[in-house]
Image: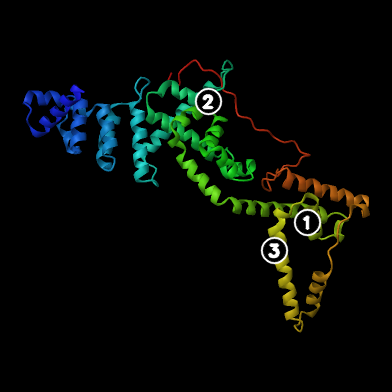
Amino acid sequence: MFKKIVLYKDVVNYINGDMDLETSELMENNTKFMISVIKYTRDKKMYQFCSDRVKKDYDMVKFMVEKFSDDINFISNLADGYISNNKTNDDDYTYDELIILMSKVYKEKYPDDFNKYAIKANAFLSFKLFVIEELFKDPKIKNNYGLGFGIFEMDYSGSKIIMDFVAKSLIDEIFYGEERENLEKILHKNYKDYNKITEKGINTFLINYISTFDKSLAGYVSNNIELINSIKKHLERINKNWNKYNENLNNEKIEFFIEKISDFKDNCCFYKYSIDDIINYIVDYFHLENIFSSYLNTLKQIDEYRLYNYNDCYECSYEYELESIFNELTNESKKINPNEMNSSDLFFLQKIIKIAREIFIEDKYLNDDEYIDSEKETKILKFPVRTNINKSIRK
C-alpha cells in the first residue's frame, strides 16, 4: 500500500515538474512508471517523454495501442515500428500478439476492410494449423486432441490475446466453416422446438456442442464465455425465424416429394390417380396434416379461384376449356385403396410410401443433389482422432 502511495506522489511530482532532472530521466526510462503517467494524464503526447528504450518496450507499445485505439494512425505507426524491429521467432510471441491486437482494433473500427494486420494474423494461424495437421499424421499419436486447441495452449497460454484469437477462429470454423453443417440446419435437425435448447441453457448447449469437436476449446470457452457472444446473437435470429424455416423446409420437401413421385407416375400404370390423390393418401398414412397444411390450403384457394373464374366467365369463348376445368374441380378425388390394386400399382405405392418415409419421417431429405436413398450406400463422415503430442508447434 505504501509503495502505491509513493508511486502516485512520484507521478504527480513528475507531471507538475517538481522532480529533479536526474530523477526525471531515471523515471522516463521506467516503463511501468511512464505507463502510470500516461494513464493519469490520458495524454498520448506524454509518450514522447519516454526514453528510446521504453518507447520500444513491448509493454509500452501494447498499452498505447489499447489505450488510444481511437487514433488509428497514431497506434499504427507505433505498432509498425515495433513489428519491423521485432520479427516473429520461437522464443518471443509479442510480434504475433501485436499483429492480432492490431487486426482486432482495425476490425472494430473498419469492420468491412481486410487490413494488412488481419492478413498477417490469418497467416500466423494458418501456418500453426498446418503444422498441427502434419503432427496429427504421426502414427504414434494416440490421444484425442480435437481441433488442436490444446496444442496452442502449450505454447501460448501466457497470451490471452493469442488464445482468444485462436479460440474465436476455431469457434467460427465449427459453426460457419464450409465443411460444417449450417448451424440453423443442425438445430432444426436435433430440436423440434427452440425452447428445448433454452431449457438446457444457451451457454451449456454451445459449450457442449463445441466439446464434440475439441474438449480443450470447450473448457477455455467456459472460462471466457464472451467468445460465443456472436454465436448467441445468431441463435436469437434463428429463434425468430424458427417457424418460417420449418415452413420453407416443409415446402421444399413437398416439392421434392412431388418431383420424385411424378417420375414414377409418368412411367407406370398409376396414371388413373392424380398427384393430389397420392398426397392425400400419404398425408393420411403418416398423419402429415401439419406438414401439408399450408400446401393443401393453397390448393384449395387455387381451386376456389379457378371455379370462381368459371362461374364468372361461362359466356366467354373458352367454354370448352372452362367446362373441362369445372368437371375436374367438381369430380370427387379418387381414394387410393391398396386392397383394390393390382401388383403393378401396389409396387408403385410401396415405392411412394418408402420415399415419403425417408423424406418426412426419417428426415433424410437434404436437397435434390444430396437426397439419401436407403437402397444406396450412405457415406458416414468421421472426424479424425487426435492423440498425445510430445512436441511444441513452434519447433
Quadrant where the C terminus is found in the figure: top left
Q: Is residue 183 left or right of residue 291?
A: left
Work out how far the residue at label 2 is from the one at label 3, CA to CA, in angstroms. Answer: 53 Å
Q: Residues within 10 Å of mark 2 (few under 14, many from 20)?
A: some
Q: Which residue is mark 3?
A: 298
Work out how far the residue at label 1 is from the one at label 2, CA to CA, in angstroms. Answer: 50 Å
Q: Amino acid at mark 1?
A: Ile
**Residue 263 image position (x, y, % from top left):** 79, 53
Q: Which residue is mark 2?
A: 133
Does residue 141 appear in the picture of this structure? yes
**Residue 203 image position (x, y, % from top left):** 51, 36
Q: Secondary structure at mark 2?
A: helix
Residue under the image location 81 percent in, 52 percent down: 264
- Residue 279 is marked as 1
Give the camera-side residue of 370 and 365. 365
Residue under the image location 71 percent in, 68 percent down: 302
